[in-house]
Image (cartoon, rainbow, N blue to C red):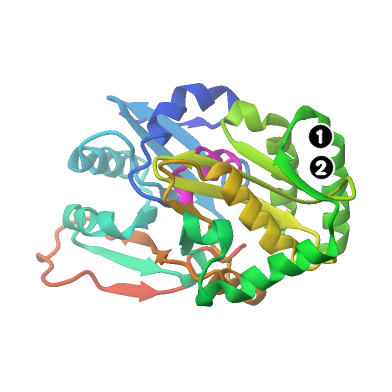
Amino acid sequence: MLEFHPLTDRDLDRLRPFLNKNPSRLCDLTVGGIFIWRDYYKTEYAIHEGILYFKVDYPGFGTMFTLPQGGDRKREYRQIREFCQRRNMPIMFYPIPREELEPLMECFPCATAMSDRNTFDYLYHSEALKYFKGKKLAGQRNHVNRFLRTYDNWSFAPLTAADAADAQAFLDRYSAAVQKESSSFKEDLEKTRQVLAQAEDYGMVAGVLRVGGAVVGLSVGEVVGDTLFIHIEKADRDYEGCYQMLVSQFAQTFAGEGVEYINREDDTGDPGLRTSKLSYKPVELLEKFAVLVEDGPCPKREGEVEVVQTNIINAV
């Protein structure tokens, strides 16, 4: 029987072995993707028979289950079905990666799969983001060169305790300059401050870009398998080429041997962010699906899974 508990920092060491075996390259199934947003999505977890389960509450959409970690899919889905039936609650899953969609729909034939382009992760070749080589990335390379010509007193280095005050001051300036009113933006800033103070505890890597000694950009991420996940990426747009320089330096510093890909997460449907992330020429957009189950007898499904396009996460 599944027994869920609120997720806290104290659970990190217990759950890390599961999350280090991320079955996909989705950012949602990493330490950063889960722990940074645990309060916003009211994340709870359960460990039953060696399998890790998460349930989350998405504003405006309801309680959903992420992809279970660590066991046999049929057994995992049976546990979730029994949990929901006992509470007379709908069975909903999110996010489900493309490769897991068919097995899930086989267990729940009476189900609807939905996708939302706003939630897809951007995946890049790590070598491409390190140096922006080739014609397709000439624009990004030009921004870096302009940054180098303009600011000869720049530096990039891994974050240390000595950077803490300057990094927090940078976030103050960033918040005042951007001034978004959404609850997710405010949560992102609050959690960024917390993660910067606990990056080592989370097992994350972080770096700061400086010009003339002042922090003008910072990034935080983690390496899982062959992928570097960038969970936090903020820069001062008043410094021309600052974002491109930050992306390049972070990749050069932390995408080491064996890291073939970089996941820079989704664009939340923001037009400017989408244009920017597309300009770095992703090798793939990682699809995410929500699956809503109508439990009970259902005719056997034939053919490919039909996907409904919708706004899955409408509060970001």
Looking at the rendered structure, the secondary structure element under dot 1 is helix
Residue depicted at x 30% and y 66%: 112
- Point out residue 48 in the picture as x, y percentages from the top left corner: 32, 27
Q: Which residue is mark 1?
A: 164
Confirm whether residue 273 shows in the render.
no
Q: Amino acid at mark 1?
A: Ala
Looking at the rendered structure, the secondary structure element under dot 2 is helix
- Point out residue 67 in the picture as x, y percentages from the top left corner: 35, 46
Q: Which mark is residue 167?
A: 2
- Point out residue 10 in the picture as x, y percentages from the top left corner: 57, 22
Confirm whether residue 274 shows in the render.
yes
Label 2: how many residues lie within 10 Å, few (<14), some (14-19) or many (20+)? Answer: many
Q: Amino acid at mark 2?
A: Ala
Q: Mark 1 and mark 2 in contact? Answer it, CB < 8 Å.
A: yes
Magenta stretch containing residue 186, yes or no?
no
**Quadrant of the rendering where the N terminus is positioned:** top left
Q: Quadrant of residue 164?
A: top right
Residue depicted at x 40% and y 51%: 25
Q: Nearer the viewer, residue 67 or 172?
A: 172
Q: Main secondary structure of the magenta part?
A: helix
Magenta stretch containing residue 32, yes or no?
yes
Q: Nearer the viewer, residue 221 or 8?
A: 221
Q: Nearer the viewer, residue 106 or 247?
A: 247
Q: Quadrant of residue 300?
A: bottom left
- Point out residue 282 in the picture as x, y percentages from the top left corner: 47, 67
Q: Which mark is residue 192?
A: none
Residue numbers of the magenta segment: 27-38
Q: Nearer the viewer, residue 206 or 3?
A: 206
